[in-house]
Image (cartoon, rainbow, N blue to C red):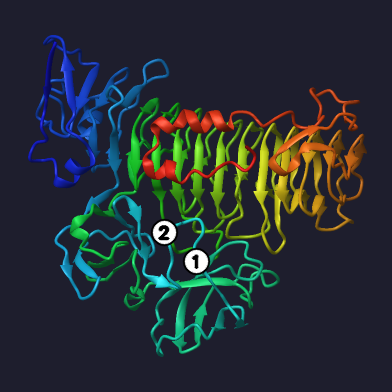
Amino acid sequence: MLKRVIAPSSRTSKIEKRRVASPLIEYLESRTLLSTTWYVATNGSDANPGTLAAPFHTIQHGADVAGPGNTVFIRGGVYHEQVTVHKSGTASARIVFRNYQNESVTIDGADPITGWVNAGGKIWTASMPTDLGQGNNQVFVDHVLMNDARWPNNGLDLSHPVLESAPSVTATTTSATINDPKLTQPAGFWVGATIRIGAGQNWGNQTGTVTASGVGFVTFSYLLHSAKFTVPTAGNHYYLFGVAGALDSAGEFFRSASGKVSLWTPAGDNPGAHIVEAKARLYAFDLSAAAYIRIQGIHLFAATITTSTASIGVVMDHITAEYVSHFSIDPLGNLVPFHTGIILAGANDVLENSVLVYSAGDGVEISGTGAVVNNNLIHDCDYAGVDAAPIRIGGYSETISKNTCYNTGRDGLLFSGYHDYILNNNVFNYGLQTTDLGGFYSAGHNGLNTVIAYNKFHDGITGGFGGAGIMFDNSSSGYIVHHNITWNVNAALKINYDTHNIQIYNNTFDATTYGILTDGLADDWTGTILENNIITHPIQFGNNVQLIDNISNHQQFVGAAHGDFTLLPGAPAVDTGMLLPPYTNGFVGKAPDVGALELGLKAFATGAILSSIPPDPSV
């Protein structure tokens, strides 16, 4: 057998050499490759024929020549490009993009920053011509996101930001003044800066513009969401960013309008000793003009994958993605920039067996028909604390199953779909920055008999109106809810306003305060049924609800504190009158797939992703 190592060419930068070892090419004999298979390598050339021995240099060139039934094999390395696919495969002959023989392939949406000059102390400067707009720029040091210079100073944990609590606020419907003795900067220091604040009941972190500032105060303009619930008030959490003078701490950067970036590395040293990059592209793959594409075994950094309604039958399997979408500006806290996260907009699109981590907005956004999101690990999403979630579910007849979602600023699963199936998911550590939310949340929506079953929703305790395991807000209707389990949430099930035709069977509803909670006992719940549920805390119902064979104030479990709701011997069971076996006799053991899922995906996750996986409180 002949073996040889191809050294990186002059096209491979010093940064790539540090990140990825030279690819190893092994073959038994020379041969002529069929045109259905193409190869790409960082040391190739787009003038080559695209064979294993003479590969292309860019994935884009592979996309340009590939047709239905073709596979583009990508050799190990880092590719700084956006791949726009213009041709489609067919249902029986997809165009495939995948890594070659499990080699490590990264499509990087960021570009290197070099040429650092010391600007005094621990701050260094360099040219950063890339500008994605206010609040959208990102700078990474050794693949970790730095903070846009801000006050109060922050760590590097995106889901648990350091925030200041406003001691005193005066507000109108268009502007507000925070009086805070910790604001020691001189007059005018913060003028033109951006404030991010969880105003009023803190349904979402909205942003405003500072119009005046001085020692002990800032005044800012803002947009009013609700005169009753979102006027800034004392106790609201906030931070300030967007002025050069705020760069005063390790792990911060500031990009000036002239295109110069200033950086204080986490170690306080010369950035030239590190891999420093700035986000330059939104997408690793743009599939908006292509159908029947398969992407497999590829890592995305600082970029995502976008599709459109034309992107039918797209499959994404065993991908990993870090820092998929980013933004810092949201004037109302519920105006998430259009399309964040991995986008599944076509009919019958699939995302499975993958790891997604770090998004200011959604981890996955689903709007097509018949999409499948299965067996994924998705965490640290909605770190902006707005109306977003690890999985945003729209469209019709989707299947969302066996996913583990945790660490999110607001909801776990955010729903506006129709006739969907939400099955066997484990959702926890949600509501980290906001209030009045759920592990599953839908507002004012008819789910058309959407099924929510065999899920775990837990560890979602918040201030304000609290966090629920499952929440149907603003007169929702049309759901079938069975065999779910909740715990360590303010309310297990929360239903607000007139709510019709929700069938709630065989669930174990544990919580800290309410088993079932409603905003008003006069609400009309005609057509809503609660049958064969175990409920451990006080309950509230609307009018005209059907109540059959429920057990309330039930505490007879083996280990509820750690998520084992198996009934103790002799405890009353709820197993009569139902047609949806196996009934709720407590949850036997743990919910399925959690440990196996995390272990199964470890082979595809980077060190940064794996190091942030916390222990599941239910295990």
Q: Nearer the viewer, residue 366 or 288?
A: 366
- The residue at the point 49 percent across, 44 percent down is 363
Going by the image, does 170 lie left or right of 50?
A: right
Q: Is residue 350 shown to the viewer in this render?
A: no
Task: State the residue lying farthest toward the left.
Answer: 10
> Between 518 and 595, which is closer to the camera in this rendering?
595
Q: Amino acid at mark 2?
A: Leu
Quadrant for residue 450, please give it: top right
> Residue 541: in sight, yes or no?
yes
Q: Position of residue 372 (x, y in %)?
A: 54, 29
| Residue identifier under label 1 | 162
Secondary structure of residue under mark 1: loop
Percent from the top left, x then y, of residue 523? Answer: 86, 54
What's the amino acid at mark 1? Answer: Val
Residue 156 tag number: 2
Q: Quadrant of residue 147?
A: bottom left
Element assignment for label 2 = loop
In this orientation, which residue lies closer to the viewer: 38 or 125?
A: 125
> Would you say 543 lies left or right of 269 here?
right
Looking at the image, which residue is at 23% across and 54% down? 274
Q: Earlier in the sequence, mark 2 or mark 1?
A: 2
Q: Residues within 10 Å of mark 2 (few under 14, many from 20)?
A: some
Apparent side of residue 11 relative to residue 180 in the rendered image (left or right): left
Indicate whether 31 appears above or below 206: above
Give residue 299's quadrant in the image.
top left
Tell me the crowding category of disc 1: few under 14, some 14 to 19, or many 20 or more residues within 10 angstroms, Cα based.
some
Q: Which residue is at the front of the view, 96 or 554?
A: 554
Quadrant (top left/top right/bottom left/bottom right) for the C terminus: top right
Q: CA distance from mark 2 to mark 1?
A: 10 Å
